[in-house]
Image (cartoon, helix red, strand yellow):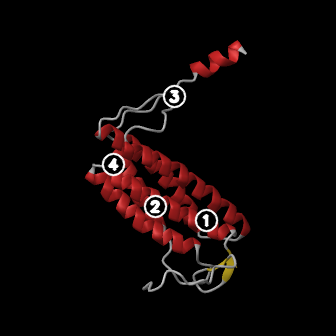
Amino acid sequence: MRISKVVTKTGDKGHTALVGGQRVSKGSLRVSAYGEVDELNSILGMASAHLTDKECIGFLEEIQHRLFTLGADLASPEGVEVPRVAPEHVERLEEIMDSMMDELPPLEEFILPGGGPGGSALHLARTVARRCERTAVLLNEQIEINPTSIIYLNRLSDLLFVMARVANKRENHPETLADFSKKRERRKKS
């Protein structure tokens, strides 16, 4: 597919075309679902720009390519031929996560999202992946979508959490444990 013109003016009245040509409101849940996946993909690009770890950057590029598949999947009504997210794509995320978990100490407490620039961007990406998943679930309640897309987003958010921890560890940014005691002290004083 070649894009020769960015401005088409076909969406000026608040509608857009799905893959296959069907026109829908830009406010539809389907458009929100694939738009949020696009947002997630952009955040992963930003995370890559802030990372120095070549392995993490490579994994993120692989995931970014897959998110284009997911976006096409969500933008395509049933019966339209496009590449779809498949169980082997979920398995690939699990493989990456398993390989990274080996170098992390077990979590015994909640950690604050943060660390270095790359790790922080990955934590942000994790929260956007969760939002994408919630929107896909809502969309699936309205119209049936590829169920693997929801599983993929769920597993991706888990992987991004692990990757954020690994990136921070590899780049020597310590994790900060969540401190609930201050909140409890404030409540006692009230």
Residue 174: image quadrant is: top left
What percent of the width, then of the height, locates residue 117? 38, 44
Left or right of residue 18, residue 156 in this image: left
Residue 66: image quadrant is: bottom left
Query: Do the residues bearing badges 2 and 3 touch, measured as CB atoms within 8 Å?
Result: no
Q: Residues within 10 Å of mark 2 (few under 14, many from 20)?
A: some
Residue 115: image quadrant is: top left
Q: Earlier in the sequence, mark 4 or mark 3?
A: 4
User: What residue is pinned by disc 2?
Assistant: 42
Q: Residue at x 33, y 48 (%)?
A: 99
Left or right of residue 165, residue 81 in this image: right
Amino acid found under the numbered disc labelled 2: Ser
Q: Earlier in the sequence, mark 2 or mark 3?
A: 2
Dot 1: element: helix
Q: Earlier in the sequence, mark 2 or mark 1?
A: 1
Instruction: Give the Cα distance between marks 3 and 1.
Output: 31 Å
Callout in the foreground (1, 4):
1
On residue 33, the disc is 1
Amino acid found under the numbered disc labelled 3: Ala
Query: Do the residues bearing badges 4 and 2 touch, measured as CB atoms within 8 Å?
Result: no
Instruction: Give the Cα distance between marks 2 and 1.
Output: 15 Å
